[in-house]
Amino acid sequence: MALHISIIAPDRTVWDANAEEVILPSSTGQLGILRGHAPLLTALDVGVMRVRIDKDWTPIVLMGGFAEVENDELTILVNGAEEGSKINKAEAEKDLEDTTIRFNEAVSSKEKIEATQNLRRARARVQAATACLAADPGRRAAAPWRRRILRRGPGGLRRSQAWHGMVPRQADA
């Protein structure tokens, strides 16, 4: 038996399927959900949710909302959502550039708040589109969550291509 996931936006049901694992962008950081998870209610931030079905990961952009886990059912209520496979990467990157310019030109507090939210949405869309390209071996793109880490001092990190960018330093080898 798998984890049943429902993503509901105000205007439609975005996703309704079973999966093995979900990684949510909660307001306190990334939150992993597996089958048999304890009951939970959490606030979601703007970001990319990752859903694992079999061995494939599917990115979905969430525009903030709430998630509830109970009896192997994950119900997500969001302000908006978009599947990564339906995002045109070129358009998303152009939107990110335009949004960055508007962010840098914002003067009033209200403009800065709106520009910050728009920038976070644009970054999430580019991240999801890039992740979809990385999952398709016929297309070239690097997964956005892979980062090169440089060694930092005796207790630091080693140079590595890490999944989430955090690999503990091994003994000097």
Image (tube, helix red, strand yellow):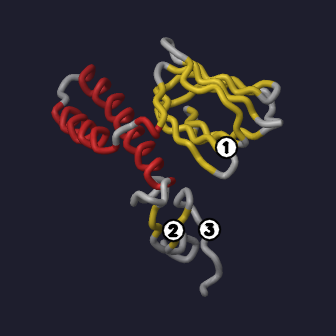
Q: Earlier in the sequence, mark 1 or mark 3?
A: 1
Q: Residues within 10 Å of mark 2 (few under 14, many from 20)?
A: some
Q: Earlier in the sequence, mark 2 or mark 1?
A: 1
* Marks 2 and 3 in Cβ contact (< 8 Å): no
Number of marks drawn:
3
- Give the Cα distance between marks 1 and 3: 28 Å
Three-letter amino acid code at the position of disc 3: Pro
Q: Residues within 10 Å of mark 1 (few under 14, many from 20)?
A: some
* Marks 1 and 3 in Cβ contact (< 8 Å): no
Question: Which residue is disc 2 drawn over?
Answer: 161
* Marks 2 and 1 in Cβ contact (< 8 Å): no
Q: Quadrant of residue 26?
A: top right
Three-letter amino acid code at the position of disc 2: Gln
Q: Is residue 121 above or below residue 53?
A: above
Residue drawn 78% across and 24% down? 70
Q: Residue furthest front?
A: 138
Three-letter amino acid code at the position of disc 1: Ile
Image quadrant containing the N terminus:
top right
Q: Is residue 149 left or right of residue 94?
A: right
Give how far across and how far down residue 99 sits, in percent.
Answer: 24, 34
Residue in the foreground of this view, choosing between 60 and 116: 60
User: Which numbered disc, 1 or 3, marks the residue closer to the eye?
Assistant: 1
Residue drawn 55% across and 56% down? 164
* Disc 3, SS: loop
Image quadrant containing the C terminus:
bottom right
Q: Residues within 10 Å of mark 3 (few under 14, many from 20)?
A: few
> Which label is found at residue 168?
3
